[in-house]
Image (cartoon, rainbow, N blue to C red):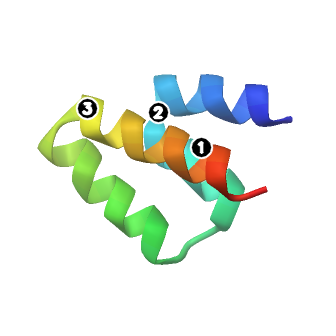
């Protein structure tokens, strides 16, 4: 399941974070990072998915 979340995080970073943690602080932080730059949003999303099992 993590592989699917990582693929979704590359395509749309907030979606991957939402599927992992829901509508919490990490989701909104990822939305901001994605708005400011697509790559920081991807990095944050992959980090959240890998560290939260």
Residue 40 pos. (x, y %): 27, 39
Residue at 64% x, 68% y is 22
Residue 38 pos. (x, y %): 25, 32
Q: CA distance from mark 3 to mark 1?
A: 14 Å
Residue at 40% x, 34% y is 42
Residue at 52% x, 77% y is 24
Q: Quadrant of residue 4?
A: top right
Marks 3 & 1, CB-CB < 8 Å contact? no
The answer to whether residue 1 is above or below residue 15 is above
Q: CA distance from mark 2 to mark 3?
A: 9 Å
The residue identified by callout 3 is 38
The answer to whether residue 28 is above or below residue 52 is below
| Secondary structure under the numbered disc 1 in the rendered image | helix
The residue identified by callout 2 is 12
The residue identified by callout 1 is 16
Q: CA distance from mark 2 to mark 1?
A: 7 Å
* Residue most extreme to the bottom: 24
Marks 2 & 1, CB-CB < 8 Å contact? yes
2 left or right, relative to 38: right
Of marks 2 and 3, which one's residue comes earlier in the chain?
Answer: 2
Marks 2 & 3, CB-CB < 8 Å contact? no
* Residue most extreme to the right: 1
Residue at 49% x, 23% y is 11
Is the residue marked by circle 3 packed among few (<14), some (14-19), or many (20+) residues within 10 Å? some
26 left or right, relative to 39: right
- Can you say which quadrant of the picture contains the N terminus? top right
């Amino acid at each position: 399941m993590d592989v699917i979340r990582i693929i979704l995080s590359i395509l749309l970073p907030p979606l991957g974070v939402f599927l992992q943690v829901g509508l919490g602080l990490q989701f909104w932080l990822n939305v901001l990072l994605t708005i400011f730059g697509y790559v920081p949003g991807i990095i944050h999303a992959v980090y959240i998915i890998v560290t939260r099992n």
